[in-house]
Amino acid sequence: MTAADKQHALSATDPRESGTQLRAGLWQTINERYPGSMIRKESYVGQARLAKPLTECRLTLVSSCGVHLKTEKPLDVCHPFGDFRFMRVPSGAKHEELIIHQLKYPHDDADLDINVIFPIERLQELSQEGQLGELTANFFSFIGYNMDPEKFERTLAAGIAEAVVEEEHADCALLAPA
Amino acid sequence: MSVPYLREADAQHDVEKLVRFVRLHLGDGNETVGKEEIDRSWAETIKILLRDQPVDREFIAQVLEKDEATLALLFYHLHFYLIRRSGRWIHDGSR
């Protein structure tokens, strides 16, 4: 077996267990910890068709990555059930103006370039190039960790949906999970 | 271990389930690690108090006047504060 083969053999193990950032055992209890949080087949909601081309659409971005402006207080990462609030992120913000506060996932790479998880500057470029009609004034961010799916839907998700439709008048939304 | 699961455990006075949830939360999915983390935060309080520095008991009295939901959440914030001070950080996210 060559060194490359050995490397391949190593990578064939579950990367979630062999990685350097995630601790052993993290995934062994995942189904016990989040059984009520998983999306079920009966929860499926079909995507709406765009009524007009993307070049004419007003697009927003919604992410569970927990990013926010450095000038704002972060969401609560300590609460054992999660923080059911969301943050507005100005769509014109730059990487250096933003910060991620999270406890439950590694964001070292996103700290170097926020666009890997919250592609705000890529969307700014697409908008400037005319490939998107325009961006909403604000994008949205929240902490994905939560232990109460019913409250999540009733508060946080409903709040973002209302803001996206009533305040930002978005035609479509890009959803970016963390 | 959703909130409905925890409410049911609370109604049945099943403290073991509640404790397991807390340990898994603080240990990021590993109950043994979570127990160690809790022990470490308590040990950190002793290390600090051993320095015998002045304390603001008036502030503590004011804090304890707050509602119990705020105090319960403050307990978690204090845990993570002490864990950060200890110098060993097991979590994937922000220090």
Image (cartoon, coloured by chain):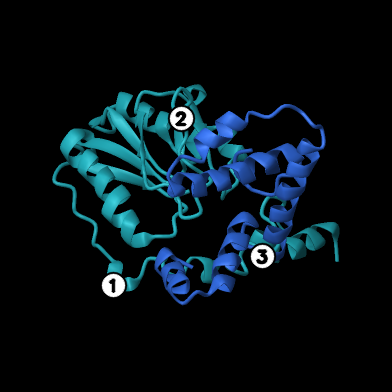
Chain colours: A cyan, B blue
Image position of A67 (left or right of A9): left
For label 3, the residue is B31
Q: Position of residue A154 (x, y in %)?
A: 27, 55
**Residue A79 visible in image:** yes
Q: Earlier in the sequence, mark 1 or mark 2?
A: 1
Q: Residues within 10 Å of mark 2 (few under 14, many from 20)?
A: few
* Amino acid type of the residue tagged 3 in the rendering: Glu
Q: Give the CA separation, mark 2 to mark 3.
A: 31 Å
Mark 1 residue element: helix
For label 2, the residue is A73
Q: Residues within 10 Å of mark 3 (few under 14, many from 20)?
A: many
* Amino acid type of the residue tagged 1 in the rendering: Glu
Residue lying furthest bottom: B12
Q: Write down the chain letter for disc 1.
A: A
Q: Position of residue A84 (x, y in %)?
A: 37, 48
For label 1, the residue is A42
Q: Write down the chain letter for disc 2.
A: A
Identify which residue, B81 or A5, lies in the foreground: B81
Q: Give the CA separation, mark 1 to mark 2.
A: 37 Å
Identify which residue, B50 or A12, lies in the foreground: B50
* Amino acid type of the residue tagged 2 in the rendering: Lys
Residue A62, located in which quarter of the rendered image? top left
Tell me, yes or no, whether the two marked residues, 3 and 1, touch with CB atoms within 8 Å. no
Q: Are marks 1 and 2 on the same chain?
A: yes
